[in-house]
Image (cartoon, rainbow, N blue to C red):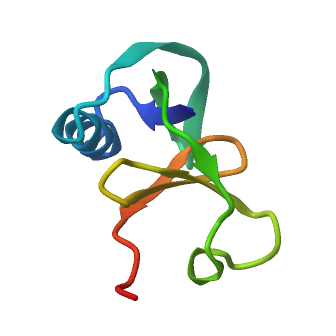
Amino acid sequence: MIVYVTESGSDRQELTEALVKEGITYQECPAETTRELGTASWRMIEVQANVPEIKVPPEYRQSEGDVRAWRLPSGRLIITDLEGNLEQIASPPPG
């Protein structure tokens, strides 16, 4: 799994806390991209971890092939856009 998060953003903290809580080792390195929004830009960090990619459950898709998903040992899902930017960390619905 490779996921991109902002260097000083809450998305980085959310992802790394989830990985630590699950006991997954990960590596961070500066990404070669920046995220631009309006007049601001943020440096990105690439987070690499050995987490299996899964088929995206229908409840997390807006259209076919618009997101990717990885399953943590607890069953929680890391959802990214197609470029690898973190969208959310979600708990699958029961059942």
**Residue at 35% across / 48% down in the picture?**
73
The part of the image, by quadrant, that contains residue 90 is bottom left
Residue 86 sits above or below residue 63 on the image: above
24 and 63: which one is in front? 24
In this image, 32 relative to 63: left or right? left
Residue placed furthest toward the top: 29
Closest to the observer, 92 or 13: 92
Q: Is residue 6 left or right of residue 17?
A: right
> At 56% across and 44% down in the image, what residue appears?
85
Where 48 sits versus 5, above or below? above
Which of the 4 image quadrants contains residue 58?
A: bottom right
Viewed as shown, does residue 90 lie left or right of 56?
left
Residue at x 72% of width, y 49% of height: 82
Residue 62's spot in the image, x, y percent?
Answer: 69, 79
x, y percentage for residue 47? 45, 25
Q: Is residue 38 above or below residue 26?
A: below
Tell me if residue 32 comes above or below residue 87 in the rendering.
above
Tally of marks:
0
Q: Residue at x 57, y 27 (%)?
A: 34
Quarter of the figure that contains the C terminus: bottom left
* Image quarter in which the N terminus is found: top right
Quadrant location of residue 19? Answer: top left
* Residue lying furthest bottom: 95
